[in-house]
Amino acid sequence: MIGMRREKPDKNKILNFLRESSGTPYCDDCLSLETGVSSSDRVYRICRREWGKGKIVRGWGGKCAKCGKQKILNYVPERERSPIVVNQPVFLRNNF
Ligand SMILES: [Zn+2]
């Protein structure tokens, strides 16, 4: 459980950032840069967990909005969807 207390604010930074730019996909590395949460390993862990909870969408299928690389991306849909739909690791939109 060590580290949980420090991960919570980081989790909120990431979720807030993704919500503010909803519909826009970012890779773990760019999320780390944009939110100031280091390292990308921590971003990875947080995003995996939030994806598991249905808070964000995570998966392959496009390019990062910032670095343009094809990587695993994270985003929040523009409209809240049911957790079941959000959990699908597939990009349903064709905006990238
Ligand atoms: Zn990126």
Image (cartoon, rainbow, N blue to C red):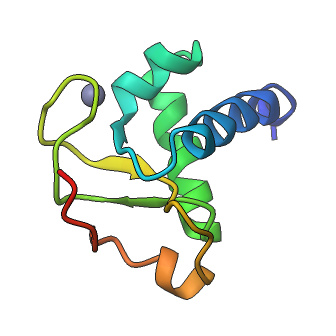
In the displayed structure, 14 sits above or below 81; it is above
- Out of 40 and 13, give the one closest to the viewer: 13
Give the image location of residue 70, x and y in percent: 12, 41
Instruction: For ligand 1, give the image quadrant.
Output: top left
Quarter where residue 17 is shown: top right
Q: Residue at x 50, y 75 (%)?
A: 86
- Out of 81 and 15, give the one closest to the viewer: 81
Position of the N terminus by quadrant? top right
In the displayed structure, 17 sits above or below 49; it is above
Q: Residue at x 54, y 87 (%)?
A: 84
Spot the residue most to the right: 5
Horizontal side, residue 35 vs residue 61: left or right: right
- Out of 11 and 3, give the one closest to the viewer: 11
Horizontal side, residue 66 vs residue 38: left or right: left
Give the image location of residue 37, x and y in percent: 59, 18
Q: Residue at x 46, y 39 (%)?
A: 44
Give the image location of residue 32, x and y in percent: 47, 21
Quarter where residue 59 is shown: bottom left
In the displayed structure, 95 sits above or below 40; it is below
How many badges with numbers are in the image? 0
Q: Residue at x 81, y 25 (%)?
A: 6
Give the image location of residue 41, x and y in percent: 45, 29
